[in-house]
Image: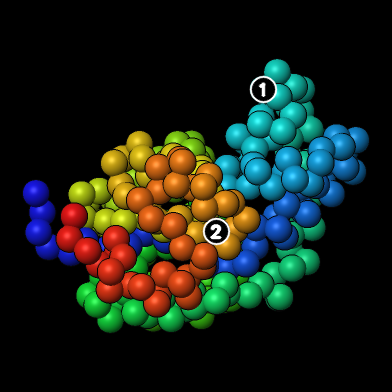
Amino acid sequence: MATEQPHGVLFDIDGTLVDTTYLHTVSWWEALRQADHPVPMATVHRSIGMGSDKLLDHLLGPERDRDDDPKLREAHDTLYTEYWERLTPLPGAVDLLRACAERGLRVVLATSAAEHEVGALRRALNADDVVDTVTSSADAQESKPAPDILEAALEQSGLSAERVVFVGDSVWDVAAAGKLDIPCVGLTCGGTSRGELAGAGAVAVYDDPAALLAELADSPLTRPR
């Protein structure tokens, strides 16, 4: 069994480090409404964290006519873009990234956001100086809960699954990490409850990045595996 601390921490961004979960929820809800697909906002929220392909399967059914999917994605992107200049880091997010780097941990932003969204998220965080690697949806053939984006993050950063921890905010994050036997720390700031995250297999759950930072020394991020 390894006795050293993990070499790196993989972070989801949307809903984990930047307060975007409900912005995506509203954007998808409106995109679907415009296309005459009325889906309750709470149902949309439960799907956030999946890739857009799986999200639409989840909300509209896998047997649907997929011809309108590109228009739905474009409508979501157009609506979400309106928020880019107002994106805000969640409490303690930037300090958490810096604290991890100061402890010698490689900081990896393992996001499946589209490439054109990643720039806005990075500008909101303003922490590129401590970030080792950043992924995007272009790096994954299949979206979460498939583990492709985490596999890409490991490959690009030179880290191994045995020496990292993943931090995310959705059950889809926990599921993706579990497929690679990577411990996942859950944060409830994306709107998923402590019980749901723990029930999905999260090894620890905190309210937000600030709460995780406050207990960093005793957290799975720095405890030996």
Indicate left or right for 85 with 3 as reference.
Answer: right
Q: Quadrant of residue 99?
A: bottom left
Question: In the image, what residue occupies the spot 40% across and 75% down?
Answer: 213
Which amino acid, mark 2? Thr
Any mark on residue 62, and which? 1
* Residue 49, position as x, y percentages in the image: 57, 47
Camera-nearest label, 2 or 1: 2
Question: In the image, what residue occupies the spot 49% across and 59% down?
Answer: 187
Residue 35 versus residue 215: which sits nearer the camera? 215
Location of residue 213 with respect to 147 vertically, above or below: below
Query: What element does badge 1 sit on?
Result: loop
Indicate left or right for 8 with 210 as reference.
Answer: left
Question: In what quadrant of the picture does the C terminus appear?
Answer: bottom left
**Residue 193 seen in render:** yes
Q: Earlier in the sequence, mark 2 or mark 1?
A: 1
* Residue 154, position as x, y percentages in the image: 30, 52
Within-10-Å neighbours for mark 1: few <14, some 14–19, many 20+: few
Residue at the top extreme of this rendering: 63
Which amino acid, mark 1? Pro
Q: On the image, numbered disc 2 is attached to which residue?
A: 188
How far separated are the C-alphas under marks 2 and 1? 29 Å
Q: Quadrant of residue 167?
A: bottom left
